[in-house]
Amino acid sequence: MFAYDKKDSYTFSFTSPDELRLYMERNGYHIPFSKDISPLSAKPVIKTPHGEITLKNSLATHPMEGCDANIDGSASDLTRRRYARFSGSGAALVWMEAISVVPEARTSDHQMMLNDNTADSFKSLVADIKKNDAFVVAQLTHSGRFAKNSDTPHALFATRSLPFEEKRPQDKDVPVLTDDYLDALPEKFAKAAKIAEDAGFDAIDVKACHQYLLDELLSAHTREGKYGGSFENRIRLMVDCFDAVRSVLRPETVLASRLSLSDMIEAPYGFAVAEGRPATPDLTETKKLLEILTAKGLSLVDMTMGSPYFNPHVNRPYNRGSYMPPEHPLVGLERLIDASREIQHTFPDLTVIGTGYSYLREFAPYVAAGALKEKAASMIGFGRMAFAYDTFATDMMAGKVDPKKVCIACSKCAEIKRLSGLTGCPIRDQEIYLPVYRELCMKK
């Protein structure tokens, strides 16, 4: 069952899918469930203005930053190893991790970066991924307040955020980016998008999640000028980047976004949150934004909520993390599924990828299949599970998930990332990542 333990974490001790289902029903969780897992093998269709694209199954890997690129932003041997695992998992879609569009915006000196010098590396990497018949998405980003690298003396804020500044008082002295700096970014996104398309990516993601730059601007209620205040101003850069990217791509290249449906950060510092109700999602503005973007050709959304830097229990329910969450992990999972369902039902032609399912370990396929049956999503994505379990998708579709290989939601992958280590699973992929965890987190 689930309970608090003495180490301020949750325990997970279900022994069968029926035990999980009964627990959810008896405790009032409205979480879908299906013993019929055939929906996982269904072939979803991405509907684009140019035509339809059919994928081989309904499972995907989320973008999971590895912090293991070469200094120039190209793929290292370890990067290639990760993507060989992701593409070999059996998932139909591989959403590549955050790729910076400018040097100063990298989260570390080992974040991936797209430019003319790294183009061949990406072309080779994408070709390797496609050997496993995977649809591949390039995630283009500017890390904004989370930029931290040799080229950047301080974080690149787009707006003031008191909730973040309470956690990091030094942020109060950092100036926000100017309108002139922001004005130049759509061209940077477009250039990187064209390189990505030429490298063989099937889709281009204009990233707006987790309080990285474009998402931070969506919540810039207190910023002055043309990028802050009103809804039209706050979405301006997102829309401008989207338009710039679309203008340079071939019609058949899919437009996508990893999008925070709600930041769950109290107003006026979060996007799509209810006034007067702390950290409560209100998807009204999310739907307005999606109406605009789908009219411009947006076809694919990998949904998320919250920020791993502020409220990680929101976007990845866990058993153990850096703090005790204020809610049961199943509450967080239910919220993610409810939000995904609301967007999917509002935009039935949009391919929506759901998230949060790694928390359920070997029982994830039953909830994932239930969500697909209810049309709470078009596909189900896995991030932490993809780090841990190299054949998760194949085994889920076959109904043969190995409990000894699943993610256990222990947050160790996030822990080593916070300390600038290589990101992976120290529990299930010990050869590479256990020594890193011991060195950085256990000081051994």
Image (cartoon, helix red, strand yellow):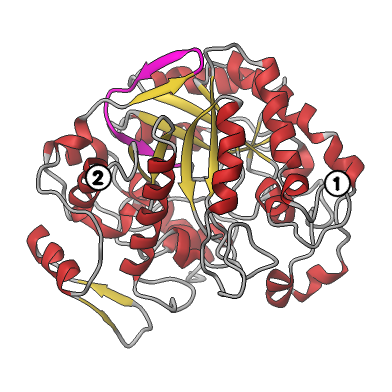
Q: Residue at x 16, y 49 (%)?
A: 402
- Secondary structure beneath dot 1 equals loop
Classify residue 404 by image quadrant: bottom left
Q: Measured along the vertical axis of the image, is residue 343 above or below residue 203? A: below
The residue positioned farthest toward the bottom in the image shown: 6
Q: Position of residue 206 (x, y in %)?
A: 62, 35
How far across and how far down the image is residue 386, in percent? Answer: 35, 44
Q: Is residue 53 magenta?
A: yes
Q: Residue at x 44, y 79 (%)?
A: 326
**Is 70 colored magenta in this rendering?**
no
Q: Earlier in the sequence, mark 2 or mark 1?
A: 1
Specify the segment rendered in magenta. Answer: 49-62
| Quadrant the N terminus occupies | bottom left
Residue 290 visible somewhere in the drawing:
yes
User: Dot 2: within a 10 Å radius of its alpha carbon, few (fewer than 14), some, or many (20 or more) residues?
Assistant: some
> Does residue 287 appear left or right of residue 184 in this picture?
left
Residue type for callout 1: Lys
Q: Say few, some or many: other residues with alpha carbon within 10 Å of mark 1 (under 14 / 14 to 19 / 20 or more).
A: few
Q: Amino acid at mark 2?
A: Glu
Q: Residue at x 64, y 55 (%)?
A: 211
Q: Nearer the viewer, residue 246 or 231?
A: 231
Name the residue tied to disc 1. 226
